[in-house]
């Protein structure tokens, strides 16, 4: 795949990838696509490329096959992995047929480097503890911050290698 920085033209890609990012346990029914249009999830792509937004898109044959992006959320409209208004929250997904090939690792490595170069100190995320992506996040140095049921907020310092 080819990796590139996300631009303002990628809002629809992020909307699609947000749907792919929703963890559905094996054997469970797929999530209704309208879920990503709720206010709690729209904030992850609506108004994309505002201050603090950054992302990486993975492409194959000019089609997006993955995305990793961060946004800053205010205290009065936090995301699921919210830690503070100065800590960007990570979202990422790889299309189902492309998973397990290292695309997530490549995107995450590039995005973390970009955030570090911008002088950011930390990044957070929210993940279901049953999601296989948890292994990827741990491998990249994310640590548990809070746990509530199956939902986990993780944090990573950006001044580590």
Image (cartoon, grey):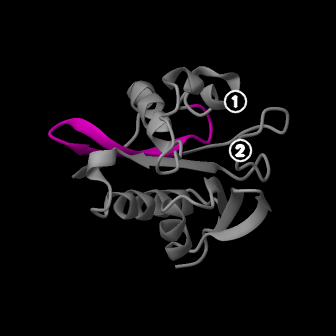
Q: Position of residue 81 (x, y in %)?
A: 70, 50
Marks 2,1: beta carbons within 8 A: yes
Q: Where is residue 90 in the image (x, y as percent from the top left)?
A: 58, 50
Asked if the magenta segment contains residue 67, the reply would be yes
Q: Mark 1 points at which residue?
A: 40
Can residue 47 be seen here? The reply is: no
Q: How many marks?
A: 2
Which element is circle 2 on?
Answer: loop
Q: Name the residue under label 2.
A: 80
Residue at 48% across / 48% down in the picture? 92
Q: What stretch is highlighted in magenta?
A: 50-69
Outermost residue on the right side: it is 76
**Nearest to the observer: residue 42 or residue 158:** 42
Q: Magenta region's main secondary structure?
A: strand
117 relative position to 123: left or right: left
Residue at 35% across / 62% down in the picture? 106
Q: Residues within 10 Å of mark 1 (few under 14, many from 20)?
A: few
Q: Residues within 10 Å of mark 2 (few under 14, many from 20)?
A: some
Residue at 33% across / 46% down in the picture? 96
């Amino acid at each position: 795949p080819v990796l590139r920085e996300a631009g303002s033209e990628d809002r629809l890609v992020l909307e699609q990838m947000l749907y792919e990012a929703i963890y559905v346990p094996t054997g469970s029914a797929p999530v209704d696509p309208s879920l990503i249009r709720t206010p709690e999830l729209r904030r992850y792509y609506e108004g994309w490329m505002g201050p603090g937004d950054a992302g990486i898109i993975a492409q194959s044959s000019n089609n997006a096959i993955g995305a990793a992006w961060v946004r800053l959320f205010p205290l009065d409209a936090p995301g699921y992995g919210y830690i503070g208004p100065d800590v960007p929250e990570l979202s990422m997904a790889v299309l189902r047929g492309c998973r397990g090939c290292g695309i997530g690792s490549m995107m995450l490595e590039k995005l973390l480097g970009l955030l570090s170069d911008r002088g950011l100190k930390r990044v957070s995320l929210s993940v279901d503890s049953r999601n296989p992506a948890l292994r990827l996040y741990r491998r990249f140095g994310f640590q548990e911050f809070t746990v509530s049921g199956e939902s986990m907020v993780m944090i990573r310092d950006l001044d580590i290698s």
